[in-house]
Structures are given as structure tokens and as C-alpha cells.
Image (tube, rainbow, N blue to C red):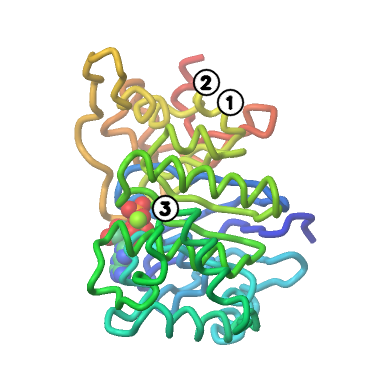
């Protein structure tokens, strides 16, 4: 039993029988925004794809529920049907959402119809309104274009507009603003916030951008090498990070005073999560010999804040 709208418990998923993300647990309440952060290759997109029942993803363990429906017990086809009905996704690259050689008009109509939301009389007004929210002002021209004819940033805004139109109860966004320039990023971030404040839309937003996470997130989850290494309320995670990896991410954010931050040398292991030992130890400034042998599961730091660093605890 769980009381959240979306609940993931010890979920382990992969593209083969080797996990690309493992031991992922969180529960989201209605209207909550969780931002997943971490470097490339840490498993953020994999988690979103697993939630959407993407056919290339295998469930290797754990469970996944939408309200009272335990999705992980259902066959893929059924799982996918329920996920598509209740959750929207905006992919990192809009090519994954749209057919490049079919007009947006046709694709919008088809998608809205498949969700039972197409109304011929109000269609154009709704599109104009949704496009305006993501600064696509020439809506008539864009609607009649095919995706291949537009830039990546334009396509990304169209994908967001479609998500706004579908108005689903859960929205998953994979790097929704990475392809956009700064002013439009802000506009999009404000629209996402409004979706939560005005319509109670629950969201998981994958981002590299800690400033965006700070602006949007109720909670932040930090992923490293396929594991969730920290999870907590956004303010707590950013002010008092419980994992040295989170500290490194915060320190790596460029500041406006012109001082260049210390970057984090190296990169995450691409081999996925290991069975034992902290995957971050090679890059960690506070690692001890013991970090290779410990099992680094999340520990409760109090106040619904969890982190998997045991070295820090050992160091006091
Ligand atoms: N389609 C795929 N097939 C096989 N492995 C993949 C695929 N997509 C991602 N991976 C692997 O899964 C791991 C996590 O990747 P991903 O979830 O894309 O990370 P992130 O979104 O955090 O950058 C990486 O090691 C990556 O190489
Ligand atoms: Mg990704």
C-alpha cells in the first residue's frame, strides 16, 4: 500500500539483464515536483523511460505503482496503455516525440484524439494559447510545419505546448530546457510551475541545471552511476547536502562574480551500478579505504532527507 500518486520502490531496470539504474525508491504526492539531477550517464533518462514503460527497458526488480495500480505486475502492453493515458513525457530530444515528416497539425489532432481531448471547434484557440505560453507566437505557421523544418529549440517548445494541451495528471520532462536560450528557459520553467500551482500536475523533471531545480523542485533526487545517492527537500539538499557528490555538483555551478568554480575531475563510471562499494569513491574528496567495501544504501538523515554516503558518517 502507498498513499502517493506515483510510487517507486527498490526499482531496478536495464536495457539488458544488467541494471542501468538500481534500487530507486521514492513516492510522489499529487502536485509535487521532483527534480532528478546528476551528470550524463547516471541513469536519469532510464528512470523516466522505465516510468513510461518504454519497450526497450526491462524491469529487473522492485515495484512501480500509480495510485493503487501496481504497474510492475502488469504485462508491458497494459502498463504502457495506463502510463500513456495518465502520464505525459517531454523527451530530451523532440525527435523522439514527433514524426519529422508529418505536420504538427496532423500529429496534434491524432494525439489529442487518442486521449479523447480533441474538440474541433476550440482546437485552434487552444493551440494558439498553448503556443503563446512557450513563446511560439506565429502559431499558424508552426502548426502547419513538419518538425524537420524547424530548429531543435522550436521543436522542444512545440513538444512542451503539446504536453500543456494534454493536461495529464503526471508530467515527466527530460532536460526540458537544455535546448532553449535563457529567456525562454525561464518562461518554460514558469509554465511548469504554473502547471503544479494551478492544476496540481505532479512532475518529475530531469535537469543538469541546479538553478532550475532550485526554482522548480519540491524535492531533489541526485543520481550517480545508476543509483539515487541523495533525496530530500530541495532547500535541504542544496543547503546541507548529505553526499559529497551533491556538494561537488553545487560547487561546480558557475557564479556571476566571474570566479570560475572548481570542476569535478573525471566522469561517472559507465558500467552502471556495482553490487558493493560506493561508485563515487574514485572521485570523492572524503573517501576512505572503507568506501570500497560498504554497501551504500540510502540512510535517513532526518526530515525526509536521505543520502547514501557512509564515509561522511564514519568521518563524523
Ligand atoms: N538505449 C540504450 N541502450 C543501452 N544502454 C543505454 C541506452 N540508453 C542509455 N544506456 C546506458 O544507461 C546508462 C544510463 O544512461 P541514461 O539514463 O541515458 O543517463 P542520463 O539520462 O543520466 O544521462 C548509461 O550507462 C547509458 O550508456
Ligand atoms: Mg538523459
Circle count = 3
- Rendered location of residue 214, percent (x, y): 50, 32
Could you classify mark 3 by the number of other residues whose Cα lies within 10 Å: few (under 14), some (14-19), or many (20 or more)?
some
The answer as to whether callout 2 falls within 8 Å of ligand 1 is: no
Tell me the CA gap for discs 2 and 1: 5 Å
Name which of mark 2 and mark 3 comes first in the sequence: 3
Quadrant for residue 293, please give it: top left
- Rendered location of residue 83, percent (x, y): 59, 74
Residue ID for mark 3: 135
- Rendered location of residue 287, percent (x, y): 35, 25
Q: Are marks 2 and 1 in contact (CB under 8 Å)?
A: yes
Residue ID for mark 2: 239
Name which of mark 1 and mark 3 comes first in the sequence: 3
- Rendered location of residue 192, percent (x, y): 55, 49
Q: 208 or 78: nearer the eye?
A: 208
Tell me the CA gap for discs 2 and 3: 33 Å
Image point 58% across, 85% down: which residue? 113
- Left/right placement of residue 164 relative to residue 174 reads right
Q: Are marks 2 and 3 in contact (CB under 8 Å)?
A: no
Quarter occupied by the N terminus: bottom right
Which of the numbered marks, if any, corresponds to residue 236? 1
Image point 38% across, 31% down: which residue? 245
Q: 113 or 248: nearer the eye?
A: 113
Mark 3 secondary-structure assignment: loop
- Left/right placement of residue 169 relative to residue 144 reads right
302 w.r.t. 67: above or below: above
Q: 55 or 163: nearer the eye?
A: 163
Amino acid at each position: 500500500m502507498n498513499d502517493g500518486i506515483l510510487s517507486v520502490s527498490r526499482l531496478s531496470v536495464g536495457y539488458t539483464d544488467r541494471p542501468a539504474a538500481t534500487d530507486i525508491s521514492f513516492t510522489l504526492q499529487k502536485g509535487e515536483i521532483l527534480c532528478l539531477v546528476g551528470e550524463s550517464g547516471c541513469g536519469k533518462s532510464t528512470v523516466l523511460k522505465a516510468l513510461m514503460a518504454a519497450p526497450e527497458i526491462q524491469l529487473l526488480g522492485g515495484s512501480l505503482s500509480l495510485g493503487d495500480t501496481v504497474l510492475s505486475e502488469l504485462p508491458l502492453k497494459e502498463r504502457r496503455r495506463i502510463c500513456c493515458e495518465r502520464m505525459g513525457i517531454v523527451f530530451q530530444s523532440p525527435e523522439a516525440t514527433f514524426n519529422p515528416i508529418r505536420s504538427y497539425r496532423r500529429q496534434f489532432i491524432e494525439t489529442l484524439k487518442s486521449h479523447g481531448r480533441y474538440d474541433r471547434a476550440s482546437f485552434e484557440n487552444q493551440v494558439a494559447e498553448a503556443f503563446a505560453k512557450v513563446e511560439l507566437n506565429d502559431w499558424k505557421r508552426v502548426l502547419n510545419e513538419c518538425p524537420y523544418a524547424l530548429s531543435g529549440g522550436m521543436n522542444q517548445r512545440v513538444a512542451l505546448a503539446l504536453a500543456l494541451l494534454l493536461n495529464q495528471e503526471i508530467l515527466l520532462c527530460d532536460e526540458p530546457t537544455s535546448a532553449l536560450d535563457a529567456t525562454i528557459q525561464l518562461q518554460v520553467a514558469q509554465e511548469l510551475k504554473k502547471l503544479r500551482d494551478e492544476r496540481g500536475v505532479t512532475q518529475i523533471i530531469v535537469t543538469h541545471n541546479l538553478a532550475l531545480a532550485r526554482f522548480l523542485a519540491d524535492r531533489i533526487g541526485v543520481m550517480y552511476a545508476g543509483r539515487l545517492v541523495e533525496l530530500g527537500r530541495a532547500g535541504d539538499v542544496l543547503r546541507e547536502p548529505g553526499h559529497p557528490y551533491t556538494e561537488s555538483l553545487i560547487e561546480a555551478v558557475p557564479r556571476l562574480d566571474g570566479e570560475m568554480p572548481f570542476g569535478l575531475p573525471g566522469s561517472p563510471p559507465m558500467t552502471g551500478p556495482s553490487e558493493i562499494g560506493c561508485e563515487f569513491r574514485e572521485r570523492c574528496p572524503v573517501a576512505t579505504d572503507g568506501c570500497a567495501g560498504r554497501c551504500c544504501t540510502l540512510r535517513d538523515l532526518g526530515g525526509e532527507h536521505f543520502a547514501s554516503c557512509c564515509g561522511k558518517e564514519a568521518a563524523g
